[in-house]
Amino acid sequence: MRKPFIAANWKMNNTVPEAIRFVTALTSDLKAISGVDVVIAPPFTALYSAGVALADTEFYLSSQNLFWEDSGAYTGEISGPFLADVGCRYAIVGHSERRQLFSETDETVNRRLKAALRNNLVPIMCVGETLAEREANQTWDVIRRQLDGGLSGIDLAALADFVIAYEPVWAIGTGKTATSGQAQEVHGLIRRYIADKFGSAVADKTRIIYGGSVKPSNSRELLSNPDIDGALVGGASLDPKQFAAIVRSAH
Ligand code: 13P
């Protein structure tokens, strides 16, 4: 049985005081929760203080990205060892905003995934199609290409943990959620892809989470699908009450 995984991707939101306020509110609200992996991905500047605020809790810290080299003359970049140093357990890799706005490719996603693994960070690897790709019936071609390229040279069977996030680009920040059926269909295909490539035991244990306008009003239905193991939440993760409600719906 896969443990539900609910992650807050704050994107470029929340200063240090705001992050501490959020974590304090969330941890007191969810004190009694168990059986769900709860993950917070603040911007780089708030990682350390959010990590300190999370220290005595069961919740995990994630970065939103990482660079593929570990150190050196790469002005403005943040690498795996620095993220591990501030207490990150997870790293989001290949978010569609990185792909669309910052020229991320399957090849750079692959390099970042390898850097995360080398530094004992568990990747949350994002894949997803645009509206034009969906309308052209290319959804699975696009996702298979992202999986092939991103996972090149990576053996999921050798890893204790690896999370894949299906985030249809047209559902991100638009209020337009994939229907439960649309999301389950792609999650099922991703799980079959993992089974074909790495074996059914790996497919059975890999968590595949959904992202794209997840809110308290739709999370329970999305999470009731057999292949949807959690959620990567953007907008609704900025309000501790809404995020807590989504975590509860996974319980
Ligand atoms: P929204 O929940 O705001 O649609 O964002 C989803 C997302 O991109 C999470 O990574």
Image (tube, helix red, strand yellow):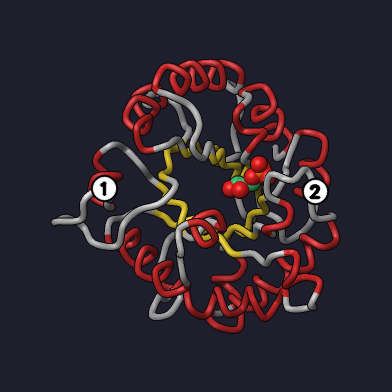
Residue visible at 32% across and 38% down? 87
Q: Residue at x 82, y 35 (%)?
A: 217
Q: Amino acid at mark 2?
A: Lys
Label 2 neighbour load within 10 Å: few <14, some 14-19, many 20+: few
Above or below for 135 versus 35 = below
Label 1, on which residue? 76
Tell me which residue sits at (27%, 56%) in the image.
Answer: 119
Q: Where does the image place residue 15, in percent across and percent down from the top left? A: 43, 24
Q: Quadrant of residue 68?
A: bottom left
Say which amino acid is labelled 1.
Gly
- Judging depth in this view, the residue of 92 and 203 nearest the camera is 92
Q: Which residue is mark 2?
A: 176
91 up-or-down from 19: above or below: below
Label 1, secondary structure: give it: loop
The answer to whether residue 114 is left or right of residue 198 is left
Classify 36 as above or below 153: above
View quadrant of ligand 1: top right
Q: Residue at x 56, y 38 (%)?
A: 8
Question: At which x and y percent is residue 138?
Answer: 73, 78
**Disc 2, SS:** loop
- Location of residue 128 (image quadrant): bottom right
Q: Earlier in the sequence, mark 2 or mark 1?
A: 1
Q: How many marks?
A: 2
For the C terminus, give its image quadrant.
top right
The residue sitting at the bottom extreme is: 196
